[in-house]
Amino acid sequence: MTHTLRLAAAADLSRAPIDITAVLDHLVREADATAATSIGFPGAVDLDHTEVMTRLGGRLWNNIGDPADEGGIAHTRALERAVITWTADLLAMPAEDRWGYVTTGGTEGTLSALHAAHRRKPTARIYYSAAAHYSVAKVVRLLGAHGILVHARPDGEMDYAHLAEQLHRRRRFPAIVVATAGTTMTEAVDDTSRIRAVLDEHHAGGHLHVDAALSGIPLALDGRLSLDDASGIGSVAISGHKFFGTPTPCGIVLIRDHLRAAGSRVAYTATADTTITGSRCGLSAALLWHAIAVHGREGHRWRASEARRLAAYTVERLNAVGWPAWRHPHAFTVVLPTPPEHVRRKWLLATDGDTSHLICMPGITPGQVDAFVADIADTRPRIRPIPRPRPATASPASSHAR
Ligand SMILES: Cc1ncc(COP(=O)(O)O)c(C=O)c1O
């Protein structure tokens, strides 16, 4: 029986008695066993969240309703507000024109932002690139909106000429453009100034949203992502479990306040209904608050720069063994030709056809990279035979081949 089937059988709730300890032990053992080779997905593993999990993990923390409200069930709303303020400050959002909350993840952030933008302009066309995360197309479908696919370059960045062409063709409709800061496969960052310029040429006032699930915080720490007045960006969505590595999936959405609709008040929750879900995870807000409080801006800047250094080292090592890897200069993500199945599986690499990636998130070590590169080097003779050295006296056939 495979591992998954064994676990499913042990966890089957219709069978009694259930050995609960054995099931939980099994899950932890499995997670421990794969931790050292889990380098394909973008969750930081260097932060210690134990204090929050130990002290708050045993009870319900539910931030129902608008985070700015004082009424209703407050739980960790004060911490949530602190997280929103810290992130909005980092992104240089004007203090009088900002709003946001802690979401379930990047997807909910984009849903919330595009819902606000689409509500203002219900006939808007929503433009996003072929390298955008699948959640963007899903959100467009959920809103019942018209989505327009824009070409992406092979390195993952949006094709701005194609965006201009698509916008021009539909110039009688309002426009919402989704840029990505850190595409899923190559961590490409769309140039929001160029998008804004193209957008203004065809649709002054069009909404520009940034899906910054992975790179939002690291780029903001560098000053390379800003939501100030000059940016022309209306909203941003960030995942919390990626750069902050929280043990619960979560995220942050920020929207320029004047672009969203005020929610209606709900009598029995004593708050405004402004968020996508009603009940919201207050534990996530506390985890984000703790991660920010412990390390501060400088600590997180250092984490990002160390992760980038390791990514640069990984590219160098892979190229040294003849495996042509590359990365964008700001990226944690290392892109490489897809290795054989056994290597991909062992290292849990994310793969799309002939391209795979690993992500040097904070906490991944040079030792893990070296072990991965050693596995790659081992596969070299099997998939690309190294030519034998030529004999000293070359035959006519071999000189012809040259
Ligand atoms: C670019 C991008 N956007 C959105 C998401 C979805 O984020 P979440 O899983 O937090 O909903 C991801 C997740 O990998 C992503 O890479």
Image: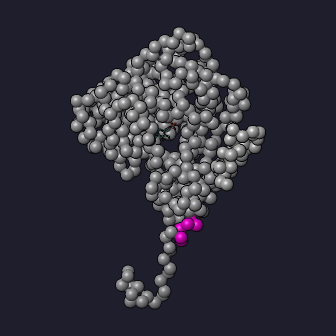
Q: Which residues are magenta?
A: 377-382
51 sits to left or right of 249: right
Is any atom of residue 324 visible in this view?
A: yes
In the image, residue 375 lies at what x, y percent?
A: 59, 62
Relative to 308, does residue 314 appear above or below in the rendering?
below
The outermost residue toward the top is: 267
165 sits to left or right of 68: left
In the image, residue 330 lies at what x, y percent?
A: 47, 45
Q: Residue at x 37, y 26 (%)?
A: 117
Relative to 157, does residue 94 appear above or below in the rendering?
above
154 sits to left or right of 355: left
Q: Residue at x 54, y 27 (%)?
A: 102
Residue 105 is a magenta residue? no
In the image, residue 59 lies at what x, y percent?
A: 69, 25
**So how many labels did they put on this image?**
0
- Secondary structure, magenta segment, majority class: helix
State the residue in front, 310 or 57: 57
State the residue in front, 181 or 280: 280
In the image, residue 155 lies at what x, y percent?
A: 39, 50
Is any atom of residue 358 visible in this view?
A: no
Relative to 352, does residue 99 appear above or below in the rendering?
above
- Which quadrant of the view contains residue 64? top right
State the residue in front, 316 or 374: 374
State the residue in front, 166 or 304: 166
Q: Residue at x 62, y 32 (%)?
A: 291
Colour scheme employed for the rendering of this structure = one colour
- Position of the N terminus by quadrant: bottom right
- Position of the C terminus by quadrant: bottom left
Residue 378 is a magenta residue? yes
Q: Residue at x 61, y 22 (%)?
A: 62
32 sits to left or right of 43: right
